[in-house]
Image (cartoon, coloured by chain):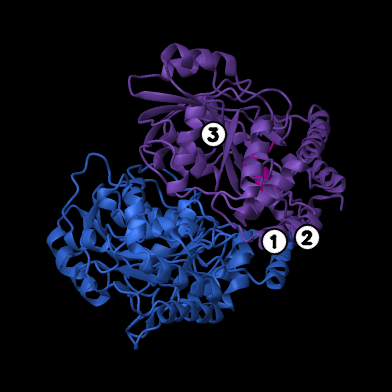
Amino acid sequence: MIKAVLDDLAIFGGCPVFEPGLAPATRELPPWDEFAASFSGIFERRHFTNHGPLVRQLDARMASVAGTRHAVCVINAEVALMVAVKALDLTGDIVVPALAPDWIFDALRWAGLTPVPCDVDPCTLTVAADAAEACLTEATSAILGLHLWGNPCDLQDLRALCRRRGLPLIVDLSQVIGGGSRVAGGDVNLVACHRDGLLSAGEGGCLATDDDALADCIRTVRNFHVSESFVQVPLRINGKMTEAQAALMLGALANLDHAVATRRRYCDAWRMRASTWTGLVDRGSQFCVLEVDAVAAGLSRDLLLRLFHAENIGAHPPFGVGPTGAFPIADRRRRALIQLPIGAATLPSQADAMIALVEFCLTHAGAIVHRLANEAMA
Amino acid sequence: MKTGIEDLAWLGGKRMFERVRPIGQLGLPNPDRFFALARRLYDDGDDCLVAMLEERLAAFHGTRYCVACGNASLALVMVMALLAEGRHGQVIMPSFTYPGLPHLAQWAGQMPLFCDIDPRTHTLDPEAVATLLSDQVTAILGVHHVNSPCRIDELQALADRAGVPLFFDSVHAFGCTYRGLPIGRFGRAEVFSLHATKLLNGFEGGYVTTADGALAQALRDGIRPPGAASAIGTGGLQRLSGVHAAAALAGLDDIDAVIGRNRERVEAYRAHFQGLPGLSWLPYDDASERFNYEFALLEVGEEWLLGRDPTVAIMRAENALARPYYAPPLHLSPHCPPNMAPPSLPVTEALSKRFIQMPVGELVSLDDIAALAELFHFIHHSADAILHRAAR
């Protein structure tokens, strides 16, 4: 449904581009037959959780995908990060990119650490090593690095910094796995599986490491069982992933290369179109993330969000509230970024419709803003 | 059938059971119902399944609110953090219980304060709780056991007088009652588990029941981590997977049948083990209450010559994965925080030497129970020979 005039926009009462139930989905569930077969197998084995065969299989597959000796799967990303902190026995501060999802800050606090946000590089939007170094204090016990939307962060220098200072490096790989390049450069690497990321079949988290002793710590921290107690650790939790979660994740992994290729194709198409747009910059190579320059574009990120939501498109800011404090680059970007629901499950027609909508809004930006202002005053 | 002690798997003989006989419920969610529900996952996503489960569980327990969580441990962390209201203090809890509890208090920014128990109910002794109350205490955590709920009225009176919140780990009290009312509606909140070894199998999962709307809403909004006023509370600990909700929903209609089969097993154990000296069963003996008969708990007295731990070892070698019941007690285990001087808890310490959790659940048949009884009769007759052999 192409918009021709302002009245066609859903925000002005027009018909939304998508029906609520048929909006572009990013959740990539396995085909139903595979799902049914996996779960029939689980029911036959009667092994539902507690370190079952599918979880062990998933651990092996994730180690292979991450390129590490070990991978340990956990109930979800937040708990995975909490487990990593206790496995490393960290206390005090941790340097974190100021532009990081809210759940990372929360998980670090649950684990008893104080996140020290570090502003990001304006080009890569990730943390540069010299900026991280400037944030270090005597209380710093680790640094966390974050790859964004398919763009790897400056790992070599971060690793060198950590080595120099005797600090462990935690790396969030979630947005670059399957890219092919070796991105697992941390002492422990985290893969977060949320509903709108890669491997979005279900919730889950994975900790990948080459360090045998650390792997034993991780396996011990994430449960209370005697049989899975390998070493002394400071604190433990129930962080077990189930056979059900593993079945969904294995299904998603089997499709990973195809999913990544599809995402890249969509993102390449967006980047080409975006290069002709004024005020919108495409940021991701596996995720569709636009940065809005409100002045150049004529409309703000928040307005674009409203316009999309009215059309039943689940666009959202990739970063939430963020840490308190002043981080000029991160704060500006946080307010300017919008992530679009483009994934391997998106149909080409849906992607095209979203592009058309963006272009319509840009073309008519002034008129849209003007009309909304009038309506507000009326 | 063992004829000589060399037949014991513990001494190299053939195992009685090829397939493991476990101690957990391990019930099967009704597959047809599960797949029908799982289709909703494809059509509508996780949230509608979780909401459906919450509604049915609230009705089951007769509570106004039910909030689903990733698992019961995470639910306990969140409730403790919420009740502490930003303070770092202590949570009074038993030591005769699940090893996770002292860890979970620490995740919530609290320290465990272990408390002795009532020798009959195995739950918190209100007199002992009274001696531990102080302005350092941020909550009282009572644990209901299979054989009895906590002495709720007395604990609530204490809690009210002291102005300290009372809440419950009700993982083993699903389907049970206190004064005829369903467990789930007492204290500020009650926490249940959907772990596969529990009565209702959701693979893993947990939920909180409460009459407190503000508490329920706070759980839904996302609890802030302790000591972090600026933290957002993203709700990461609180999410239950839709596929887990589907499994739990698929088992909800079968609960009465499950409890019925549990009761049959408990009665079979009692019948077959009659006449063995020094052995008795922890009774489900209050006719005015409902039980779920989740566990068969064998009490080993002095007359049973072999002793509790060697008996467990012999069974486990046969692939019957019995285990000592809450032994060692938490305050004397590696789960006790390292810098904490363990208190003296005489009732707990005595009870933790006496019970065996016997194999139960859907993977243990009445024939298996008869076979275990035969094993025990054999052990009884050969006790001297076994002890002699063990001493070598």
Residue named by callout 3: A100
Q: Which chain is purple?
A: A
Colour in which chain B is drawn: blue
Let me know if residue A280 appears in the view: no
Residue B301: give x, y in percent of width and height.
Answer: 26, 68
Give, as a three-letter code, the residue at label 1: Leu
For mark 1, name the chain: B
In the rendered view, does B315 fall on the left or right side of B284? Answer: right
User: Mark 2, mark 1: which one is toward the viewer?
Assistant: 1
Give, as a three-letter code, the residue at label 3: Ala
Give the numbered dot on residue A19: 2
Give, as a three-letter code, the residue at label 2: Glu
Measuring 43% from the left and 25% from the top, which residue is drawn there? A142
User: Mark 3, mark 2: which one is toward the viewer?
Assistant: 3
Please tell me whether the stretch drawn in magenta is mainly helix, strand or loop: helix
Residue B198: give x, y in percent of width and height.
Answer: 49, 66
In the rendered view, does B205 fall on the left or right side of B148? Answer: right
Quadrant in the picture for residue B37: bottom right
For mark 3, name the chain: A
Image: B24 above or below A340: below
For mark 2, name the chain: A
Label 3 secondary element: loop
Image: B293 above or below A14: below
Alpha-carbon span between mark 3 and mark 1: 29 Å
